[in-house]
Amino acid sequence: MILSSHIRRLIPDFAKAPLRRVHRGLRAAAGGGALSPFAHHVRLQAYGAEFRFPARFRFHRKVARVPPSPTWKSTFFGALCRDERSLFLDIGANNGQTLLEFAASPAPQRYIGFEPNPVCAGYCNDLILANDLDAAVYACALADTAGAVSLLVNPDVAHDTGASIMAGLRPGRELRGVPVVHLPLASFRGMIDYSDIAMVKIDVEGAELMVLEGAEDLLAEGDAVIICEVLRPDDRSDPEAIAAQGRRLQALVEKHGYGIYAIVKATEEDRLLRLEPVTAFPSERWTRETATLNDYLFARPHHLDLFRSVTQNGIGFSVSTG
């Protein structure tokens, strides 16, 4: 309860101690000092489970706009992360949507996320505390080297989910630079056993090649299935530079025995229809119509056998080998 010194002088001494106790009780009920005495949690259904959403900065209004029912991804999580050692890596955790999708799945709850936007990372960790999840989100970007860079965010949206460390991704737009640290995934080898990683999601707004170059030892030594967003060129970006980056990304994952499959979805139902093999990433420019066509699966042949068995158990999508 933050009061000006003038108002505090008007409060009788005998009333100050009870007011302080009320203040402490409100803070505890709200989940801590970061939320102020007016903070609260909103209970909502998301991905087939009920969660407590901390209402800090009204983030819950955006994060809570998630489907109440399970999605194709949560079914994937349950199929791939089946034992207690299974670990899910979420690279580009945003505001915690995938965190909740994983937590709602039948998979054992071992999750590590990375999110460079400090505002979003803070909210993710609030979600983890509010729902007592076996998870952690680190406030850093993953890249091919260790260093510092500006995260380019919409100046009007502190929790911008489209923020990027790639300066050429959306040229000509008014963006604000937020200083962030970037590290290669190899920096975390002391705390992450690569053999435990069953699945990786990468959503890093154009920096996916840097992420995987910094995680090449995971590609070489591990056996994780990877869901990766690869964006088409912006209408003001250099399409040749984006295409060259796509070719390097394709060569890197194929070098380690991964095939690339487009994830084709029925967007009105958030339902997976099929996996289609990809011989090259699309080079046409991004449009609103292609906004849902940027998700890919990097999988080895034996992963496809697993997906086929999962299909027989009710996911209902097809796997094409070309």
Image (tube, helix red, strand yellow):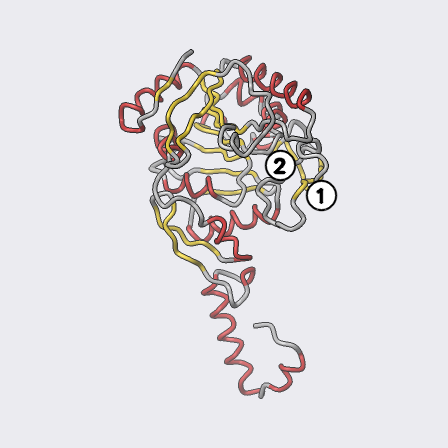
Mark linked to residue 312? none
- Left or right: where does residue 291 sit relative to residue 163? left
SS for dot 2: strand
Q: Residue at x 42, y 34 (%)?
A: 267
Mark 1 burial class by Cα count in 10 Å: few <14, some 14-19, many 20+: few
Q: Which residue is mark 2?
A: 141
Residue 7 vs residue 111, the one in the foreground = 7
Residue 193 vs residue 157, the one in the foreground = 157
Q: Amino acid at mark 2?
A: Ala
Q: Residue at x 58, y 29 (%)?
A: 286
Vertical side of 89 occupied by 63: above or below: below
Q: Tell me where residue 74 appears, x and y as whole percent.
A: 38, 35
- Left or right: where does residue 207 sit relative to residue 45? right
Q: Amino acid at mark 1?
A: Glu
- Left or right: where does residue 102 sit relative to residue 145? left
Mark 2 burial class by Cα count in 10 Å: few <14, some 14-19, many 20+: many
SS for dot 1: loop
Vertical side of 185 occupied by 55: above or below: below
Vertical side of 62 occupied by 191: above or below: above
Identify the mark nearer the N-term, 1 or 2.
Answer: 2
- Left or right: where does residue 225 sit relative to residue 161? left
Q: Tell me where residue 153 appears, x and y as whole percent.
A: 65, 43
Q: Tell me where residue 110 appears, x and y as whole percent.
A: 43, 37
Where on the picture, by quarter, is residue 83?
top left
Cα gap from disc 1 to disc 2, whole angstroms? 22 Å
Tag in front: 1 or 2: 1
Name the quarter where the C terminus is drawn. Answer: top left
Where on the picture, by quarter, is residue 306?
top left
Q: Which residue is mark 1?
A: 174
Residue 93 vs residue 264, the one in the foreground = 264
